[in-house]
Amino acid sequence: MLLKNALLCDALRECKADLRVDEERGIISEIGESLAPKSTESVLECSGKVILPALIDMAYPKNQVLSRKNLESLTQKALRGGVGSLLLRPESTPRIDHAAIIELVSSLDSSLSVHFLPSLAPTTLESKPKIAEIATLISSGARAIYLESSAQNIDGYTLYKIAQYAQMLQIPIIASPQEPSLSEGVMNESQVSTQLGLPAIPSLAQTMQVAKLCELARYSGTKWVFDVISEIESLQIISHFTQMGARILAQTSLHHLILSDEHCALFDTRFKLFPPLKDPATREQLRTHLDSGISLLTCLQSDSYKSKKDQVFESASFGINALEHYFSLGFTHLVKSKLITLSRFSELTSYTQAKLLSLPKGALEVGLDADLIIVDLQKSFYIEDSFSPYNGEHLSGVVTQVLLGGKPKSL
């Protein structure tokens, strides 16, 4: 297949060119100006469109059932949002802590359009957790170690041994640094939480765990990703330790760069996220770290059932269902508003994830997987979903076509 007259954009370039896909091998086979179609080769005219690597998201939520039905539903949302690959958390049913479960994920992945990549739980679920067979799980196909929320209670020796395994196997550790005993509130500790009389989560819940895990990262030499960083102090701590040689990347939710805790002022549960949305001043400071400090973005997809949101604020579930609008939200709020370039957006949502997880994708280069999205930046639409925090918003940038492994997928 030959894609003609497009603007090619990834983390490394932005230029007008043609792109050829080897459909049998599922890779990008040629990039150049004025490429001529081969005999019997299909041609897709992309004049006025932009081709980017498909997005890769690393925060598919915990407590989800690993079933074909659930993943098929997620697949359609992902494709519409421009996402081609999703990393699954191990906090699912069944829990990803055994080679047989990774094989289950692989079998589901092979029958679905979007790529589902398993991460692993490094400890067993016992009264005294034991380290899982990490090497076996990695050889079975797990792409990363994921420290679950309960992992904050793992003793220091076990954490250090897990870090040693990660270093030996050259895989990253992904952790959500939140102190459980300080995270029992329902929103950010601020003037808004005081006015509403709601139990709040202080910034210390994140920063104290960031400091602890940063030292472990520095000492062990392991590559870490902290998910989801929402505190400026956390970014400052991470910066301090990276200057000392620690290999740490900060991942931030797209929504923490768009929304603030002021949206919760009317007890609106659509804006109840975890970590909680921050005050407007913190949001603005987070935005200034998009060029450096923040290395990855996530859509923070959580698929909360609407019935779990349609409750009083304290009882409603955390989470947001915005995967199908991921690209458009990012383009409208970050790129079109000139906070970052489209190339930087691609780096934050695809290139860095691919490098981290050792995936042959994430850039427009010959030999890499042809996981591509074609977008029309001039098209726009309104979100019509009363349960979405973005209901009624006018978004620009529409994903018109998705190719995964060089094969077109229906949206």
Image (tube, rainbow, N blue to C red):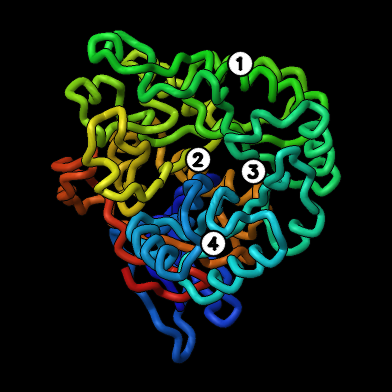
Sequence order check: which comes first, mark 3 or mark 2? 3
Q: Nearer the viewer, mark 4 or mark 1?
A: 1
Dot 1 falls on a residue whose secondary structure is helix
Specify which label sits upstream in the sequence, 4 or 1.
Answer: 4
Question: What residue sits 47% from the left and 66% below the top?
Answer: 67
Label 1 sits on residue: 208
Q: Which residue is mark 3?
A: 146
Neighbor class of circle 2 (other Cα within 10 Å; few <14, some 14-19, many 20+) is many
Frontmost of labels 3 and 2 is 3
Q: Disc 2 on helix, strand or loop?
A: helix
Inspect the image, locate mark 3, and give the three-letter code of the amino acid beneath it: Tyr
* Label 3: few (<14), some (14–19) or many (≥20) C-alpha neighbours in 10 Å: many
Residue ID for mark 2 = 348
**Few, some or many residues within 10 Å of mark 1 (<14, 14–19, 20+):** some
Q: Are marks 4 and 1 in contact (CB under 8 Å)?
A: no
Residue type at mark 4?
A: Phe
Question: Would residue 244 appear left or right of 287 to someone viewing this image?
Answer: right
- Between 64 and 46, the one lying in front of the other is 64
Disc 4/disc 1 C-alpha distance (Å): 32 Å
Q: Give x and y (percent) for residue 200.
A: 38, 17
| Amino acid on which the number 2 mark rests in the picture | Leu
- Vertically, is 142 above or below 201? below
The structure residue drawn at horizontal position 51% and vertical position 76%, both measured from the top left corner, is 111
The location of residue 315, given as percent across then percent down, is: 31, 33
